[in-house]
Image (cartoon, rainbow, N blue to C red):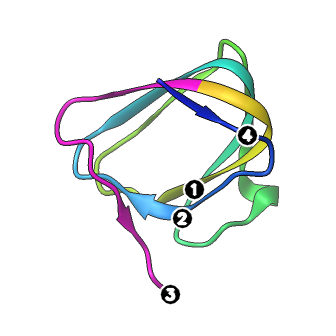
């Protein structure tokens, strides 16, 4: 479980294992790719969930304090994409 405050930016990154996230409260914008582009993101609110396969670059923007639950089928690593 993770709580993030409004204005948090999660820079582009990937994980070694698949990731499933459930939004418990708040709003988060999630997108795929190595660069943040809010216009290509998807707004996720309470009750939403998403799955990102292993090694797929993604990012997130927190627009309203959010609590998420993150599930993974392996190591909970994070590999940032350095441009």
Residue 38 appears left or right of 49: right
Q: Is residue 8 above or below residue 17?
A: below
Which circle's residue, 2 or 3, is located before the other in the chain?
2
- Residue at image point 76% right, 32% down: 65
- Residue at image point 57% right, 56% down: 59
State the SS at label 3: loop
How many neighbours does mark 2 have within 10 angstroms: few (below 14), some (14-19), or many (20 or more)?
Answer: some
- Whether label 4 touches label 1, CB < 8 Å: no
CA gap, disc 4 to disc 2? 23 Å
CA gap, disc 3 to disc 1? 14 Å
Q: Nearer the viewer, residue 13 or 51?
A: 13
What residue does disc 1 label?
59
Q: Nearer the viewer, residue 77 or 56?
A: 77
Which is in the foreground here, disc 1 or disc 2? 1
State yes or no: residue 74 in magenta: yes
Which circle's residue, 4 or 3, is located before the other in the chain?
4
What residue does disc 4 label?
5
- Residue at image point 17% right, 36% down: 74
What residue does disc 3 label?
83
CA gap, disc 4 to disc 3? 25 Å
CA gap, disc 1 to disc 2? 7 Å
What residue does disc 2 label?
33
- Residue 37, how many percent across, how many down? 73, 65
How many neighbours does mark 1 have within 10 angstroms: few (below 14), some (14-19), or many (20 or more)?
Answer: many
State yes or no: residue 46 in magenta: no
CA gap, disc 4 to disc 1? 16 Å
- Whether label 1 touches label 2, CB < 8 Å: yes
Look at the image and give the residue range highlighted in magenta: 68-83
Q: Is residue 7 above or below residue 44?
A: below
């Amino acid at each position: 479980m993770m709580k993030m405050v409004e204005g948090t930016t999660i820079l582009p990154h990937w994980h070694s294992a698949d990731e499933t996230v459930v939004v418990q409260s708040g709003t988060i914008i999630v997108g795929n790719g190595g660069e943040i582009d809010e216009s290509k993101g998807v707004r996720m609110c309470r009750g939403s969930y998403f799955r990102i396969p292993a090694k797929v670059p993604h990012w997130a923007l927190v627009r309203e304090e959010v609590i998420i639950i993150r599930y993974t089928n392996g190591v909970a690593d994070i590999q940032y994409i350095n441009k």
